[in-house]
Image (cartoon, rainbow, N blue to C red):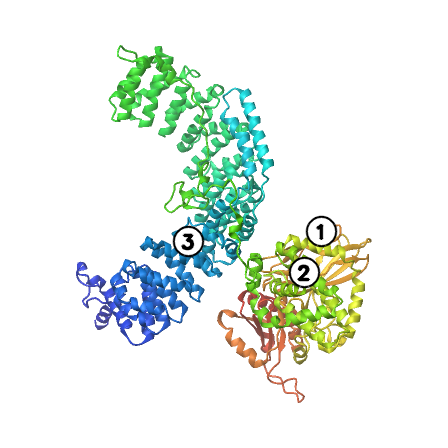
């Protein structure tokens, strides 16, 4: 019993059995006693002197808030800790206060002096949090304090605090709109900020406070365009939307000539369709003449700033954030010339693979776009086919898009799709499909009969909803050519017995009444049946029965006079007043009496007037007057806070308002494109650390020692490597030495691209090489400048993948330089190598050398360490130390039959690839088995997974029949075994090939002592360790074979044993030898440790420790295979 009572006490209830655990009476509040206790506990922790307890309490409180629980009763206890010295506690207190300051204003006001002190705190996070809390207290008394705090924060050193100031501006504006003028001054100051962190937030504040003050944007327009790519994603969305509105007020319509021609051409013709044709022709001719004259008078030239905006937003179509892609798409739709809008289609189709909510918004916008620009999405028709897993609203939107895209060429495939959709279980979707078929039939005359026949077949469907929807659509189609289809009307008349859906019954009755001359025998009988069931029908059906009766009375009064009177009498006493009113009105109109007025004479004209066929239009037809991507567009109604998209101006406003006076000391962010900015940012550290001091003197030394041609060609290749189009032409013309030096410096900085070209290390090595060589002697300078020239031209070739203009430069270069065939080049290189002093060994560039042979993978560990880090060439190393090339496993890249005589094999040379240390060197062996010579062997159309890079092998201009050649290329596999795909091209043919690395080739050997190995292994335990037991193959139980097989499977180096087996007095080997191997992955430098522990009778245990678990798993499989075969 004591145990159970203790258990009950612990639960917080009474000890007696059978009673509720949390108090006796539910109304007494005892149920919540545990909550109170928990809060008391938290209050005690917050009042304690220990920071650790306070921190724990604050974490729990913030967690409660995150789960949506109310923690407002803790406000007094939390607010006391706002002056706490511990920064972690302080941050969490501020998070809590931001949430509850508005609810507990009086208590928050008491600690306002602490917040003001917080604004002066040395920690930027505290300053920002204090400002955030201050702006969350919504009391008008503290407006002046807030205003002062925002002004101070706007000129804070930290961009994070300035960003918070921008966030506080809209809060203050909503609290006191009279502060607008002062806030605009702060916005103007923050708009001039050059940091990407602030840009998005200040534009948001601008949009909230003063969106009409477009003049504040002029000076900052180009800066915002250039910063855009580096701003955070939600900032990008806000900036793009603002710039869309800005561009609509500042630039001319790029499609002005096309829209004028459209208006002059097609629009007029349809409007005046019923007038005399001669007048129309004359007017049309005049209009065309006018528009042609206008087009000639004002040829459209795009403003460079307009082009800047389009160019800088285009890369964002690849953003991972759907909102950014949508924002760029709407910008292009509203601002770009028609010829360029097509680029957004692919990006929007990509978003259709996202969540259903994203799909819904994207499809709404695509549906609007397809009405105006159908051709844009036609290539992606299949992307809009409907999946069975799609939600109904997405199915309906996809149907809308498919219907908009339908034309004479693709209608057959679309109708085949629709036939499948009609079999769906989703009834709303089926109804929408039938309406879509109707719209296709009205829009495309050629398939109207096919659609009608298909819909008539649906009338025999078991599903009532399908039949009902078909009837409604058929009714609309029949109105176009009723005389042809009287048999369909008869068929539909028979359906009145079965169909119960009110809309469908009403449609059939309307059709029979409207075209009663075509079915004179059936119509009266239908009316007879309907009169019987009149009282049980829905209101919509009753109204159509009355209409049918009236029409038949006017056309066939002999047969239907009594029936009509019966129906009108029933309607006279109906419960619905609409029906009663309609009955009275019709009786007076069609049954003439003395009282009835002049209208009854025209009864027939009123009821049987020819009615125009309904136009089946897309519900998205007029939605594009709302800005795409906006909430108003989604709802098709103006939402609160929506700003109309301005119309294009008639004449272009003055473009000089966007000019900014550039100070000489200011870096050239205004001139360089955003992509270059990104490059500059990525490589800031190595640029400033290593080459800043060297670049000046080495450049000048080169220019002095060289005869001139070398430095010229180098600068030429650097210019071609830069991505900016505008700078190329400017810099080519300038010839003063000082300017060239400055430009070279900035070029060096910008030259290193983000992913696809030289790594930082190689450029540093090059510069160090320059410095050393210029010191050694001037006599060697000529040959070295040639070498440098060659390597630089190679670097420019690899970089030329970035832009089309660079590709052209590359072609011109190839044409200009008449390169000798491959073999003589090799000979020259060998001659040069013999002259090289030992000083140059570590920097020597072996890329032109064809025979990159590997260091023997099972040399003694001491030799490996001696050779570690050297780029060895065959002339320096003694042949004995080199493994024969047959020791490396070679793979077939191109079979001689597939390659029409050209055979290509490749192997992973396991040499450091000197132009870029992050790349794996791949040695290619070309054999020409054909009778004819192979010319210009090179690579094209490289297709890589994201992050991967390729350094192409130098082009082999001539490979005579029966000869062989070797080349080396570098591939950065990004530590993955995904294949690098490319085309291997000769002068006449292209062959698709791919290189997929075994996981063991993605690493390079690294030397560790046994102690270092064990230390590193200790840090890579748990998830990073994979252990497998195995039985060694009978031939693989001695040390030599195990080491040989492991190093053959993976490019690792042996870790020497601590037992000093290699010392001169031999030590007896241990009972269970342990073999350790170490390496690092080539790209990321992640450590890879392999341990093989041998046991009795060939049993062994293999352990792999690796930071990258995927690589570890794959490596275990490969080594297991090597040791057990």
How far apart are labels 3 and 1 at the CA level? 55 Å
Indicate the position of residue 2 as horizontal and vertical percent values: 21, 73
Q: Nearer the viewer, mark 3 or mark 1?
A: 3
Looking at the image, residue 904 lies above or below residue 335: below
Residue lying at 76% horizontally and 69% vertically, measured from the top left: 782
Indicate the position of residue 714 as horizontal and vertical percent values: 70, 63
Of residue 716 and residue 985, the one placed in the foreground of this image is 716
The residue tagged 1 is 990
Identify the image quadrant of the N terminus.
bottom left
Label 1 neighbour load within 10 Å: few <14, some 14-19, many 20+: some
Identify the image quadrant of the C terminus.
bottom right
The residue tagged 2 is 796
How far apart are labels 2 and 3 at the CA level? 43 Å
Label 3 neighbour load within 10 Å: few <14, some 14-19, many 20+: many
Q: Is residue 384 left or right of residue 846?
A: left
Of residue 926 and residue 250, the one placed in the foreground of this image is 250
Q: Residue furthest bottom?
A: 1065
Indicate the position of residue 492 as horizontal and vertical percent values: 42, 23
Do the numbered discs 3 and 1 sit on residues whose CB atoms are within 8 Å? no
The residue tagged 3 is 206
Label 3's element? helix
């Amino acid at each position: 019993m004591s145990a159970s009572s203790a258990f009950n006490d612990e639960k917080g209830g009474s000890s007696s059995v059978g009673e509720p655990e949390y108090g006796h009476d539910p109304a007494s509040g005892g149920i919540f006693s545990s909550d109170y206790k928990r809060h008391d506990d938290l209050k005690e922790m917050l009042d304690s002197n220990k920071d650790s307890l306070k921190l724990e309490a604050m974490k729990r409180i913030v967690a409660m808030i995150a789960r949506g629980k109310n923690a407002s009763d803790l406000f007094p206890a939390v607010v006391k800790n706002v002056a706490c010295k511990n920064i972690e506690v302080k941050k969490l207190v501020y998070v809590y206060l931001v949430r509850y300051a508005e609810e507990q204003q009086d208590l928050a006001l008491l600690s306002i002096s602490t917040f003001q002190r917080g604004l002066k705190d040395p920690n930027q996070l505290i300053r920002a949090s204090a400002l955030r809390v201050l702006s969350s207290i919504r009391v008008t008394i503290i407006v002046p304090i807030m205003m002062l705090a925002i002004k101070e924060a706007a000129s804070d050193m930290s961009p994070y605090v300035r960003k918070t100031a921008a966030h506080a501006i809209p809060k203050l504006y909503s609290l006191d709109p009279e502060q607008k003028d002062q806030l605009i001054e702060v916005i103007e100051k923050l708009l001039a900020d050059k940091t990407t962190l602030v840009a998005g937030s200040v534009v948001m504040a601008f949009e909230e406070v003063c969106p009409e003050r477009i003049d504040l944007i002029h000076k900052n327009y180009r800066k915002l365009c250039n910063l855009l790519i580096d701003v955070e994603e939600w900032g990008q969305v806000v900036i793009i939307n603002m710039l869309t509105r800005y561009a609509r007020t500042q630039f001319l319509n790029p499609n002005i000539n096309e829209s004028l021609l459209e208006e002059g051409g097609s629009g007029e013709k349809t409007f005046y369709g019923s007038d005399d044709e001669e007048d129309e022709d004359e007017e049309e001719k005049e209009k065309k003449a006018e528009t042609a004259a206008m087009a000639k008078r004002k040829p459209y030239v795009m403003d460079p700033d307009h082009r800047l905006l389009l160019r800088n937003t285009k890369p964002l179509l690849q953003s991972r954030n759907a909102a950014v892609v949508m924002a760029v798409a709407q910008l292009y739709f509203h601002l770009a010339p028609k010829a360029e809008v097509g680029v957004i289609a692919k990006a929007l189709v990509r978003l259709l693979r996202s969540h259903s909510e994203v799909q819904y918004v994207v499809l709404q916008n695509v549906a609007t776009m397809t009405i105006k620009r159908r051709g844009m999405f036609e290539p992606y028709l299949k992307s809009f086919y409907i999946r069975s897993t799609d939600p109904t609203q997405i199915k309906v939107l996809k149907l809308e898009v498919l219907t908009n895209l339908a034309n004479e060429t693709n209608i057959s495939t679309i109708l085949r799709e629709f036939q499948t959709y009609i079999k769906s279980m989703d009834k709303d979707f089926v109804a929408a499909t039938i309406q879509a078929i109707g719209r296709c039939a009205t829009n495309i005359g050629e398939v109207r009969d096919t659609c009608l026949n298909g819909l008539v077949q649906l009338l025999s469907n078991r599903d009532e909803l399908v039949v009902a929807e078909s009837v409604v659509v058929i009714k609309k189609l029949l109105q176009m050519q009723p005389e042809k289809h009287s048999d369909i009307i008869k068929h539909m008349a028979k359906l009145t017995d079965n169909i119960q859906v009110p809309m469908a019954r009403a449609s059939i009755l309307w059709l029979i009444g409207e075209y009663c001359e075509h079915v004179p025998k059936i119509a009266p009988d239908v009316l007879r049946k309907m009169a019987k069931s009149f009282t049980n029908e829905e209101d919509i059906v009753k109204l159509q029965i009355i209409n049918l009766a009236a029409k038949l009375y006017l056309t066939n009064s002999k047969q239907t006079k009594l029936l009509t009177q019966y129906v009108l009498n029933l309607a006279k006493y109906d419960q619905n007043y609409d029906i009663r009113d309609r009955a009275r009105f019709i009786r007076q109109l069609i049954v003439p009496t003395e009282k009835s007025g002049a209208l009854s004479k025209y009864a027939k004209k009123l009821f049987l007037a020819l009615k125009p066929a309904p136009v089946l239009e897309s519900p998205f037809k007029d939605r594009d007057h709302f800005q795409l991507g906006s909430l108003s567009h989604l709802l098709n109604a103006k939402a609160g806070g929506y700003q109309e998209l301005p119309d294009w101006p008639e004449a272009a406003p003055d473009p000089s308002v966007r000019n900014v006076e550039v100070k000489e000391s200011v870096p050239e962010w205004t001139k360089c494109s955003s992509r270059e900015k990104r490059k500059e940012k990525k490589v800031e550290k190595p640029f400033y650390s290593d080459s800043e001091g060297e670049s000046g003197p080495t450049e000048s030394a080169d220019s002095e020692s060289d005869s001139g041609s070398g430095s010229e060609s180098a600068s030429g290749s650097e210019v071609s490597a830069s991505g900016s189009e505008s700078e190329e032409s400017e810099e080519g013309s300038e010839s003063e030495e000082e300017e060239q030096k400055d430009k070279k410096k900035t070029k060096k900085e910008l030259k290193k691209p983000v992913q696809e070209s030289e790594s930082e290390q190689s450029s540093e090595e090059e510069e160090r090489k320059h410095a050393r060589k210029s010191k050694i002697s001037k006599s060697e300078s000529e040959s070295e400048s040639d070498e440098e020239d060659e390597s630089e031209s190679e670097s420019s070739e690899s970089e030329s993948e970035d832009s089309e203009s660079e590709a052209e430069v590359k072609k011109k270069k190839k044409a200009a330089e008449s390169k000798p065939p491959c073999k003589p080049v090799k000979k020259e290189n060998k001659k040069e190598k013999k002259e090289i002093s030992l000083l140059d060994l570590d920097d020597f560039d072996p890329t032109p050398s064809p025979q990159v042979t590997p260091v023997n993978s099972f040399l003694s560990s001491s030799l490996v360490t001696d050779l570690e880090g050297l780029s060895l060439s065959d002339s320096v190393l003694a042949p004995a130390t080199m493994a024969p090339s047959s020791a490396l496993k070679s793979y077939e890249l191109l079979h001689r039959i597939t390659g029409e005589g050209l055979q290509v094999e490749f192997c992973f040379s396991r040499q450091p690839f000197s132009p870029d240390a992050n790349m794996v060197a791949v040695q290619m062996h070309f054999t020409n088995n054909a009778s004819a010579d192979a010319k210009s062997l090179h690579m094209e159309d490289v297709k890589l997974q994201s992050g991967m890079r390729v350094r192409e092998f130098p082009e082999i201009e001539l490979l005579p029949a029966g000869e062989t050649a070797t080349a080396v290329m570098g591939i950065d596999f990004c530590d993955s075994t995904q294949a690098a795909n490319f085309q291997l091209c000769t002068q006449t043919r292209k062959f698709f090939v791919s290189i997929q690395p075994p996981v063991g080739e993605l690493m390079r050997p690294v030397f560790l002592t046994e102690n270092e190995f064990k230390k590193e292994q200790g840090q890579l335990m748990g998830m990073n360790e994979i252990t497998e037991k195995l039985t060694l193959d009978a031939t693989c139980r001695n040390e030599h074979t195990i080491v040989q097989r492991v190093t053959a499977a993976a490019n690792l180096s042996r870790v020497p044993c601590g037992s000093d087996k290699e010392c001169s007095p031999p030590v007896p080997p241990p009972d269970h030898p342990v073999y350790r191997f170490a390496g690092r992955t080539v790209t990321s430098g992640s450590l890879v440790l392999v341990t093989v522990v041998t046991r009795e009778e060939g049993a062994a245990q293999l352990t792999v420790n690796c930071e990258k678990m995927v690589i570890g798993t794959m490596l275990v499989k490969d080594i297991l295979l090597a040791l057990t075969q």
